[in-house]
Image (tube, rainbow, N blue to C red):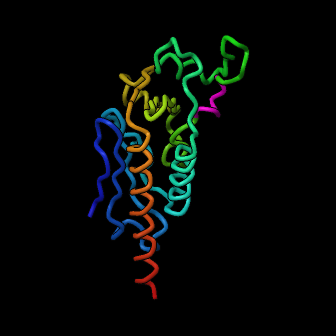
Amino acid sequence: MTIVLGNRDGFAIEIGDRDGYDPNGHLRRVDLWAAGQWLTCDDNAAFVAQFRFALAREADWLRTGGGPPPPWPDLSPEANHRRLPGGTATPDGEAAGSPDHHRALDWGPTTDNLIAALFRDGDHLTLTFQFWREDHLLRHPEHAGRVFTVELPTAEFVGLLDRARAALDDTAQQHQQQRR
């Protein structure tokens, strides 16, 4: 049975049934959606232990106040996203434009087909992402140069990450019990 958390037009995590996917229980189909786009179109086989850790790390980072505001507040989220890879300094000379300060969805091979950033404004966050792999862009030329944006409450995003991690924890525990 597939577990669906969130909605595809905002942000969603879909965790596929473990039966028949990986007999050892180490891999699980995980599909991510944002702004109506299938993010894991290049690789949706998540290594469960690593993926759970990555979800927990990002949720904890946000729960403890992580997630800086956009370095260029007068620009759109898309324009901020486009400036980040170059690490351009802010008008006051600080390196807040470093992509590491805003990195998001850095969840291993499942999401390494994306350049993604997170900008926080109090209780809300904006996720921006773009596809970068040439083979993806050849299959989807409409994605070339396009930056997608999703805005949602921080608590909602953290809740989705926590629920996905819990669902993957349940799966890991069930698999261990079956092996005994």
Q: Is 144 or 91 nearer to us in this picture?
A: 91
Relative to 65, does residue 47 appear above or below in the rendering?
below
Image: 166 above or below 149:
below
Q: Residue furthest bottom?
A: 180
Query: In which image quadrant can residue 150 be found?
Result: top left
Residue occupying the point 65% across, 20% down: 86
Question: What residue is at 50 percent from the left and 31 percent from the top?
Answer: 120
Which residues are the magenta region? Answer: 97-102
Q: Give residue 95's quadrant in the image.
A: top right
Residue 44: image location, x then y, percent: 42, 51
Instruction: Tell me where residue 91 appears, x and y as whole percent.
Output: 67, 11
Q: Is residue 110 magenta?
A: no
Expressed as whole percent of the image width and height from the top left, the position of residue 109 reads 53, 48
Chief secondary structure of the magenta portion: helix
Q: Residue at x 47, y 21 (%)?
A: 77
Quadrant where the N terminus sits is bottom left
The answer to whether residue 100 shows anywhere in this view is yes
Whether residue 134 is visible to the viewer of this picture, yes or no, is: no
Task: Report whether 18 appears left or right of 126.
Answer: left
Looking at the picture, does residue 127 appear above or below residue 79?
below
Foreground of the two, 33 or 21: 33
The image quadrant of residue 179 is bottom left
Q: Nearer the viewer, residue 108 or 80?
A: 80
Q: Is residue 101 inside the magenta stretch?
A: yes
Q: Is residue 149 above or below residue 29?
A: above
